[in-house]
Image (spheres, grey):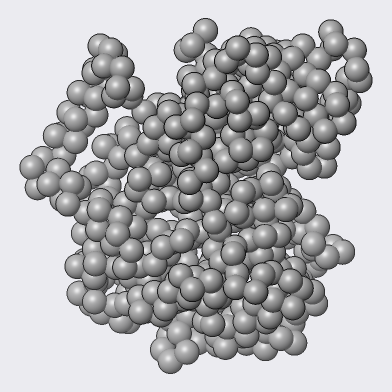
């Protein structure tokens, strides 16, 4: 890390200040530095990486980040920043995901339908055939969704010829799908994910495996409207996987920033974004040190930016109202387990599993979500499980393992509040739920860490503890986060958004950071 420059005003003048050193902030900084800008990144924590940072949670045991899906990072960003030269290696296919059963063989689902065939046939020969058709449909519609998700949203209100051309081009991409697929795309977006997958498959275990990403870190159940759009989003963004896990992505981004001359400052908490006459001047830290720049790119969540870092008199009333009502309440608890031996599932003890999901039916998933409506925790939480130490043995001592669990659903605004007793009680629920499927789990546990939505808010500075910075509801995705800031710029001149609260949303994608940087470069 570059040491703090002290209080010399000349040392603290930059072209761009980036708030936050998560993967999006680092992506924005590297791309702007590559374009010739003098860039500084200010990170409130002692380490960079945000939700994809490697951290020790017990002596000798390390997490690979809070978000463990390393299959979403944009290939174009990897090429543009040369991340493969900075230590990032990718595998062509994500590892298969396993759904254990208490009664039955479980299901090991490969992305490739040929590899998945024998496993699915154990449950339904018809579903094995349908899975081939399902994957083929997703491949056919991929060009349209890639255009939507990997491009700067057009300015519909401005109506300039470039924006009209962009809209027309997107419409043409949709039309090229052919009438049948085009009508299907228009039909399925607003659907609930359970209805759409039930149209495809008769095996609930298979459907629950596929539906998981639509609900991960969200405040929705499988019967919630428009959750199918979130499944499509994940499928379209998913591709090659970082072999070293999520933290290897931010490690490569950090090296890229350093080699491009970006100044990275940790333990640098922004207190205020300074604005005069509607124009950015810079930022002031909590220790009163100031940094000056005509451009500030904020990768923190939008509500933190507008409700905590900016004086309300600089914010238009309508924007302030929208930000106040932006839905940011998290429903996910993160549990890390240090194990003295590999995790094995009772129904298939022979399998070495890197990724598993515990949910056997849509009704089970819906009941788990339903509890949050009444500010209660799910009594049978849905578990999204990764064992990152299989592909990255450096995360644990020899012959030991780390288990990383995203547990759904537990509300930020828990009835009775999140104290230590509530935290440990939910941690017990998660462990007992996993132990009911696993072999001798309790005997293997050396240590555990439980992070509630409130803990996530405190540690990572995320309003409401939401791991996507804001809910992935359809209304908060079409113009994300709000209409006034849907194209990364804001009503305040020189202020841009570049985090997961912007298009195309959360996950370790690098796309909000990349597209925000391109917007800034285009603005001149």
Q: Nearer the viewer, residue 404 or 16?
A: 16
Above or below — where is 178 with respect to 173? below
Where residue 54 appears, as percent x and y from the top left, is 73, 51
How far from the left and from the top, in percent, is residue 285?
80, 29
Q: Is residue 395 above or below residue 292?
A: below
- Quarter residue 20 falls in: top right
Q: Quadrant of residue 161?
A: top left
Residue for point 47% across, 12% down: 522
Q: Residue at x 32, y 32 (%)?
A: 147
Q: Is residue 89 left or right of residue 259?
A: left
Q: Quadrant of the N terminus?
A: top right
Residue 272 seen in the figure: yes
Let me know if residue 39 appears in the view. no
Which residue is situated farthest in the left direction here? 179
Q: Is residue 392 above or below residue 172?
A: below
x and y, in percent, of residue 361 in the image: 37, 79
- Among all residues in the image, which is located at the extreme bottom? 103
Does residue 233 lie above or below 31 as drawn?
below
Q: Residue 269: horizontal and vertical position, in percent?
A: 78, 35
Residue in the picture at 17% in, 28% down? 172
Q: Residue at x 44, y 32 (%)?
A: 318
Question: How many numbered discs, if any?
Answer: 0
């Amino acid at each position: 890390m570059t040491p703090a420059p002290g209080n010399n005003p000349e040392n603290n003048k930059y072209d761009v200040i980036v708030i936050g050193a998560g993967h999006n902030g680092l992506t924005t900084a590297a791309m702007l530095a590559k374009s010739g800008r003098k860039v500084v990144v200010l990170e409130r924590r002692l380490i960079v990486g945000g939700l994809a940072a490697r951290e020790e949670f017990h002596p000798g045991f390390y997490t690979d980040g809070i978000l463990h899906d390393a299959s979403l990072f944009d290939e174009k960003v990897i090429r543009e920043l040369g991340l493969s030269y900075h230590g990032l290696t990718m595998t062509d296919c994500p590892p298969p995901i396993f759904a254990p059963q208490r009664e039955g063989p479980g299901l090991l689902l490969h992305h490739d339908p040929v590899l998945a065939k024998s496993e699915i046939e154990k449950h339904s020969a018809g579903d094995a055939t349908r899975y081939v058709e399902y994957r083929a449909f997703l491949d056919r519609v991929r060009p349209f969704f890639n255009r939507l998700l990997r491009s700067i949203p057009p300015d519909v209100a401005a109506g300039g010829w470039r924006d009209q051309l962009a809209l027309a081009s997107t419409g043409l991409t949709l039309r090229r799908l052919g009438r049948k697929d085009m009508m299907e795309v228009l039909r399925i977006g607003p659907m609930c994910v359970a209805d759409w997958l039930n149209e495809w498959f008769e095996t609930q275990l298979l459907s629950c495996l596929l539906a998981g990403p639509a609900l991960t870190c969200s405040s929705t159940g499988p019967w919630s409207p428009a959750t199918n759009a979130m499944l499509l989003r994940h499928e379209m963004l998913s591709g090659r996987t970082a072999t070293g896990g999520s933290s290897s992505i931010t490690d490569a981004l950090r090296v890229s920033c350093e080699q491009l001359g970006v100044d990275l400052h940790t333990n640098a908490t922004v207190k205020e974004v300074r604005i005069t006459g509607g124009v950015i001047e810079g930022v002031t830290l909590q220790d009163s040190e100031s940094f000056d720049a005509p451009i500030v790119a904020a990768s923190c969540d939008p509500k933190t930016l507008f409700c905590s870092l900016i004086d309300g008199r600089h914010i238009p009333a309508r924007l302030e109202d929208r930000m106040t009502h932006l839905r940011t309440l998290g429903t996910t608890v993160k549990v890390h387990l240090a194990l003295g031996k590999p995790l094995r599932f009772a129904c298939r003890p022979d399998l070495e599993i890197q990724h598993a999901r515990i949910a056997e039916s849509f009704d089970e998933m819906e009941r788990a979500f339903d509890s949050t409506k009444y500010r209660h925790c799910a009594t049978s939480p849905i578990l999204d499980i990764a064992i990152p130490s299989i592909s990255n043995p450096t995360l644990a001592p020899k012959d030991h393992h780390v288990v990383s669990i995203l547990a759904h659903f537990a509300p930020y605004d828990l009835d009775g509040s999140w104290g230590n007793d509530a935290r440990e009680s939910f941690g017990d629920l998660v462990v007992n739920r996993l132990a009911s499927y696993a072999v001798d789990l309790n005997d293997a546990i050396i240590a555990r860490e439980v992070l509630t939505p409130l803990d996530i808010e405190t540690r990572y500075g995320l309003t409401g503890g939401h791991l996507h910075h804001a809910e992935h509801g359809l209304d908060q995705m079409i113009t994300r986060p709000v209409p006034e800031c849907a194209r990364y710029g804001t009503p305040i001149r020189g202020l841009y958004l570049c985090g997961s609260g912007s298009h195309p949303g959360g996950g370790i994608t690098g796309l909000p950071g990349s597209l925000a940087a391109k917007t800034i470069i285009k603005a001149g």
